[in-house]
Amino acid sequence: MMMKSRIAWFCVLCLMGLGARADPEPAAAEPEHKGARYLLGAALSVEPEYAGADRQRFKLRPLWAMQYGRFRLSTSRASGLMSLGGGEAGGPGASLDLLRGERLRLGLSLRVDRGRDSDESAHLAGVPDVRGTLRGRVYASYVLAGPWSLAGGLSQDLLGRKGGLLGSLDLNYRGRLGPGTEWGAGAGLSFGDRRYMRSYFGISEAVAARSVYAVFDPERATRDLHAGIGLSRVLDRHWVGFVGAGISTLLADAAASPLTQRRYSYSAAAGLAYRWGP
């Protein structure tokens, strides 16, 4: 029953978004390319084993994206490389811009959330996995003035697998260092509902009985403060590359969780991709 209510909630958001798209006089939109565009590449990153871990891990991930008009299918970071300057409001997965004007962008997306595998870290021994799920997200971004913009999103577990609701709000800056070279920086806050916080930071009585951790029931919604900076460059007609780095600190109950070994963390990534199409 709860799963049906989540799917119904997401459908309502879809209808609201379609209503926004039907506005007879929207703001001037970005030019849309005719035909499909594609991107394929790879990125190497270093990041915490899980949110709150004290150990880092390296990962080599594929970068791929396909865009046709306002519809985009992509991995994380790939959509930002598809069209430098367009941002990555939709994030990874399948996204559709319902409203795309000079200042305001509004859309919906679906993505697979892989959850958290307890085998990823020795600190998670005895802690149950967070099951993978399908997330529906509503996102928006608004250009405040010049290179400044505000972006936010709400992401809901649609399959009722204890993923809960996750949200974020970020202030971003984007500038140019020359032809084909862009840099950006941003900072923001992320938060989750009680179901999300319990799944990723809580310790139930059953888990406490079979692990080294004490019972912990998080109540506060704030998850972390984060900031990052990145550089993207068009290398020639087809090749594009990027480098980036970020820092974050867990807040409130997320920082106080027994699973949190270190509240501060950093990440970095670099990637190269080939793009083609109109």
Image: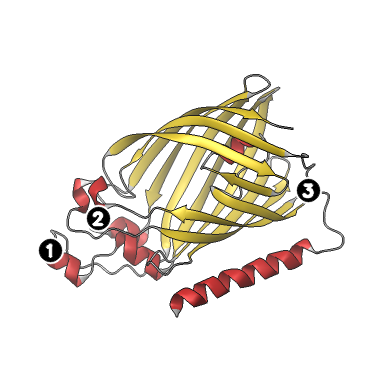
Residue 218 image point, x, y percent = 32, 67
Residue 97, given in percent of the width and then of the height, sits at 69, 53
- Depth check, front residue: 26 or 34: 34
Measuring 70% from the left and 32% from the top, which residue is drawn there?
A: 277
Q: Residue at x 47, y 56 (%)?
A: 190
Mark 3 → mark 1, Cα distance in angstroms: 55 Å
- Check the image and tell me how it is coloured: secondary structure
Dividing the image into 4 quarters, which one contains the N terminus? bottom left
Left or right: residue 109 versus residue 217 is right
Provide residue 139's location: percent of width, then percent of height: 61, 57
What amino acid type is highlighted by mark number 2? Leu
Q: Which mark is residue 259?
A: 2
How crowded pointer 2 is (Cα within 10 Å; few <14, some 14-19, many 20+) is rated as many
Nearer the N terminus, badge 2 or badge 3? 3
Which type of secondary structure does the marked residue at label 3 adopt? loop
Q: Which residue is mark 3?
A: 102
Compared to residue 106, the image places residue 182 above or below, namely above
Q: Which mark is residue 90?
A: none
N-terminal of the pair, mark 1 or mark 2, is 1
Q: Amino acid at mark 3?
A: Glu
123, 220: nearer the viewer: 123
**Residue 54: % across, % down:** 26, 43
Mark 1: give few (<14), some (14-19) or many (20+) Cα within 10 Å.
few
Q: Which residue matches tag 1?
A: 210
Assess disc 3: are there few (<14), some (14-19) or many (≥20) residues with their C-alpha within 10 Å of its C-alpha. few
**Label 1–label 2 contact, CB within 8 A:** no
For the point 59% across and 48% down, which residue is it? 171
Position of the C terminus by quadrant: top right
